[in-house]
Amino acid sequence: MPIDFCHIAPTPHLENFVDDRNTHLALAHLIETDKAYEDFYRGQSSSTIILDNSAFEMYKQGRPMYPSHKLIEMGHRISADYIVMSDYPNQKGQDTIDAAIASAPALRDEGFKTFFVPQSVIGDKEDYIDTFKWAAYSDAVDYIGISILGVPNAYGVEKDNKLQRFLSRWKMMRELSDRGLLQVARDNNKKIHFLGMVDGPNEIALMGDHAAYIDTWDSSAAVWAGLNGISFDSSPTGLVNGKFEEEVDFDFETCDNELLEIAKCNVNYIDEICGAAQ
């Protein structure tokens, strides 16, 4: 099956790039603060909606994670199907496991399915793998997220090394496959989602045979780079200068047709790669 990609866009351009896709990933911190953003995702109820806990954004901003009751309330507002449970970057994996054990029953009671994101202390690859293993077997987990932050952290390469960061999730998928854990997750009916994208869209193609285990993927890379005049290119990663690091401005709006066309071409580029994934 092809990978179902969830493009992320500034609120004024959601209808340009995101409307009526099969699966959406909505960000909790925007559901909380942006009524137009909330209204858009409420209107996508015929699609599968994952409510992300915004852990990546909260971690980068040094803010505390959302409590489960707050995520449940926001999930109901947009009729989400899955809620990403609290996870704790750069903390031992057991902290994230304990949070999932505590919150999963409440999420299920409220009609949501659960989404678990393995984490570990920076440099502790084995703890990350053990945390994934727990999720692959656990009845508390429906979806497993492979994080743009968690995996590079596990290898200790999240900062200042774009090559290592770009290769980190490919390496992790190989390790999980070699240990039989990807198949365990599949046999136990767990879906797998890739959260975000590192230094270019060709990370999707890099997954190769392991792409068959990836159900969904999300990123703002196509739209946000395009709206800043950056086209995907023929370099090995698809972005010759690596990830466009400027934080997404979700209030950004433009009528510049050239920028909108670049973003559209970037979206199509990713969709074509995902369509070829088997």
Image (cartoon, helix red, strand yellow):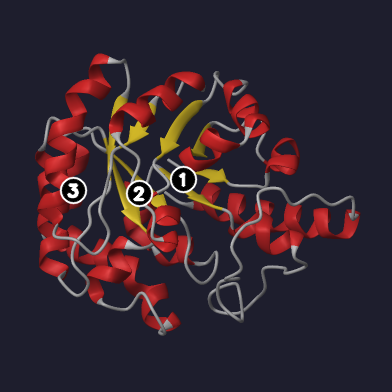
User: What residue is shown with label 1?
Assistant: 3
**What x and y, as percent, mark residue 167?**
37, 74
Residue that label 3 marks: 96
> Along the line of sight, which residue is nearer the eye, 46 or 112?
112
- Circles 1 and 3, Cβ within 8 Å, touching? The answer is no
| Three-letter amino acid code at the position of disc 2 | Ala
Q: Give residue 183's position: percent from left, percent from top.
A: 18, 47
What distance separates the C-alpha of mark 2 from that of mark 3? 26 Å
Q: Judge left or right: residue 247 versus residue 87.
A: right
Q: Earlier in the sequence, mark 2 or mark 3?
A: 3
Quarter of the N terminus within the rendering: top left
Check whether the beta carbons of the residues at disc 2 and disc 3 lie within 8 A of each other. Answer: no
Question: Is residue 269 visible to us here?
Answer: no
Can residue 190 be seen? yes
- Residue bearing the label numbered 2: 212
Q: CA distance from mark 1 to mark 3?
A: 26 Å
